[in-house]
Image (tube, grey):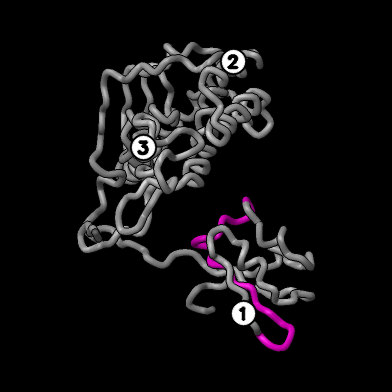
Amino acid sequence: EEQRLDGVVARGITGTGTVAAMAIGLETGVIKLPYIDTTDRKIHLTNGIYFGEEDVREAGKAIGAIRAGHRTLIEEVGVDDAEIRTMYMAGASGTYVDPIKAQTVGLIPRVLEKTVQAGNTSLMMSYDILVDDDGLDKMQDVANAISSKHIMFATSKVFEDIYVNELAYWTEGMSMDMYNEMVQYAGLRPLPDIVRPKEIVRLVLSDIPVIGARGLKTLDDVGVYLMGSFEGCIGCKKCQKECPECALQVSTISDKKYQIRINTEHCLGTACKNCQSVCPESVFNFSGLKIVRKGEA
């Protein structure tokens, strides 16, 4: 049955919805990593939208990276899990995601006394600076008072050791007992049992609490196109067929000349470049494409 919210039909699942699906699936046993224990291996939502096993694996990779990140910080700083009493959650996801579900999947630490959902803190800070003549100086004083140790996850052996096990847990079905054994073998601390926060504070009802007299405008069409053609392209359209986001189109310009057009709204960018790697003629050059505004294409 088609369901609508304010006249809008759901077209997909949000990040907070993904967290909820993962948490409930894990708690109920419907998700038995890395599989979904239903007849068609899918969790059906509404309007034909479903959550599949590939979604479980991809979400798990992202969640695993975040958990590996805060576990790395705990190890590098040398604090005990019980010393982390409060978790501040900012941004849209931090405003709308259920903290308990976030803790269930591993997005926030497993031992907490309190969570605070603070909304869009960057926007609120900008607002404070604008309305307070001394606001910028106050922010600078805060920045100057912060002492920090910069940790590059990309080169951190601790992060690497943890994330390898996160990948095995989410994508290969490694048990939590084995996970803890492996991190201990690497000289790191195991994940503690979950201790639910006693207090959940939500400071705002929406991530942008003050929208001004003009309100907000929703942009339905965002992004630009990346366009170009490559000498030696044979028009096989393998790049188009292999694009995981269906963001790429190949069209014929003239005899033996073809144009590539990528919709950046959907493209994964240089983190993917699958289009370039699958080119049988090795002529596709992602960096050789030019930016074209959608109205000019």
Q: Are marks 2 and 3 in contact (CB under 8 Å)?
A: no
Q: Position of residue 208 (x, y in %)?
A: 30, 47
Image quadrant assignment for residue 239 = bottom right
- Does 226 sit left or right of 230 as displayed? left
- The residue labelled by disc 3 is 94
User: Can residue 296 be seen in this snapshot?
Assistant: yes
Residue 42 vs residue 287, the one in the foreground? 42
Q: Nearer the viewer, mark 2 or mark 1?
A: 2
Q: Residue at x 48, y 30 (%)?
A: 143
Q: Are marks 2 and 1 in contact (CB under 8 Å)?
A: no
Q: Residue at x 25, y 45 (%)?
A: 209
Q: CA distance from mark 1 to mark 3?
A: 42 Å
- Please tell me the numbered disc located at residue 181: 2
Q: CA distance from mark 2 to mark 3?
A: 31 Å
Q: Position of residue 287 (x, y in %)?
A: 69, 62
Give the SS element for disc 1.
Answer: strand
* Crowd class of label 2 (few under 14; some 14 to 19; many from 20; radius 10 Å): some
> Amino acid under label 1?
Ser
Q: Nearer the viewer, mark 2 or mark 3?
A: 2
Give the SS element for disc 3.
Answer: helix
Q: Which region of the structure is painted magenta?
A: 253-271
Image quadrant assignment for residue 241 = bottom right
Give the SS element for disc 2.
Answer: helix
- The C terminus, quarter of image: bottom right
- The residue labelled by disc 1 is 251
